[in-house]
Image (cartoon, rainbow, N blue to C red):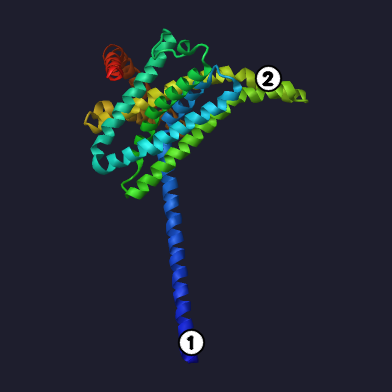
Amino acid sequence: MATGLLALLDDVAAITRLAAASLDDMAKIAASSLDDVAAQAGKAGAKAAGVVIDDAAVTPRYVVGFAASRELPIVWRIARGSLKNKLVFLLPAALALSAFAPWAITPLLVLGGCFLCYEGAEKVWHAIAPHDAHGDDASADQGDPAGLEERRIQGAIRTDFILSAEIMAIALATIPTSGFAMQAAVLAAVGIGITVAVYGVVALIVKADDVGLALAAGARIAPVRAIGRAIVASMPPLLRLLSVVGTAAMLWVGGGIVLHGLDEAGLHAIGHAPVTLAEVVAQAVPGGLGSTLGWLAGATASGIFGLALGAAIIPLVGRVIAPLAGAAKRAFAGG
């Protein structure tokens, strides 16, 4: 009887050791998978950096003109809309594309790149010759701040949808061939991480002047008050700089995406030109400076191509696409 009991206890101990080893292996596998997700999400996010910069640079303009108490609620609502764009609409669409139509990823990326080139070129053209390209919603809602706020938020979310689609498509193209679960996890991590980063930065930007005013008015120490005044004074040029950086990023990323698509389509002389230029410059200048200048030369070439392409698209949008979209909208509203 005692021998049987000891044997049973020994079996239980063996099973316990086996279960512990299995749990340890499962924990190691889970940790490894999380590391893979984080690494791939970081790589994909870096590839989409240009679009992310533009997203962060564009958004602050949607809160201009509102009371300080409404700035963070507006940013929060746009951030929620952005997260919904990425996780509810774009992530399933990206996974479906990867599973059923992987051949469509590059053409869609190229279309998104053309849109970025158009938006960037439109901003440059607006800076040279100010005009009303997209319609000004301020006059339509004079005396109705709530209506203006709602229109601004919806406009921001629509713009974010395009930028988010480009971010998710770039991320999808960056993920190496892997299982469905890994792709979903990486895309979700990219969507959440970029949304938190972008709108966290936007919140800091839009509230920086309030912090500066509080320091300038309420601080007891003169140097702190001086810092507050400097923050307030620096915000207008910072917003202008962000606008310039965002436009440059749009053209650089959009042009680079289209050129990469041309390269994959077999037009190597055009599609590979910025890379070739970057290599030539990097080899001509020794040391780390050569790599930096080479990258800058390649990015500049992509940006110039993006600007030229966007400039060519502007009349197409104004004379063909916009009238057709307006007619379709009126027909839909009438029906």
Question: Residue 105: which disc?
Answer: none
**Nearer mark to the viewer, of 1 and 2:** 1
| Residue ID at (24%, 39%) | 101
To which quarter of the image does residue 161 belong?
Answer: top left
Percent of width and height locating residue 37: 42, 48
| Residue ID at (32%, 48%) | 180
- Asked whether the viewer can see residue 159, the reply is yes
- Where the C terminus falls, by quadrant? top left
- Give the crowd class for mark 1: few <14, some 14-19, many >=20 residues within 10 Å: few
Toward the left, the furthest residue is 266
- Asked whether the viewer can see residue 284, the reply is no
Question: Residue 5: which disc?
Answer: 1
| Residue ID at (36%, 24%) | 116
Is residue 29 left or right of 98 when viewed as pictured?
right
* Mark 2: secondary structure: helix
- Sequence-first tag of 1 and 2: 1
Are circles 1 and 2 on residues that touch, CB within 8 Å? no
* Mark 1: secondary structure: helix
Percent of width and height locating residue 119: 38, 20
To which quarter of the image does residue 41 belong?
Answer: top left
Choose between 139 and 42: the one closer to the eye.
139
Query: Against 145, is 51 above or below?
Result: below
Of the residues shown, which amino acid type is indicated by label 1? Leu
Residue at the spot of label 2: 229
Query: Against 221, is 17 above or below?
Result: below
| C-alpha separation, residue under disc 1 versus residue under disc 2 | 81 Å
Percent of width and height locating residue 170: 35, 35
Choose between 317 and 241: the one closer to the eye.
317
Of the residues shown, which amino acid type is indicated by label 2? Arg
Query: Against 39, is 195 above or below?
Result: above
Percent of width and height locating residue 3: 47, 91
| Residue ID at (39%, 14%) | 134
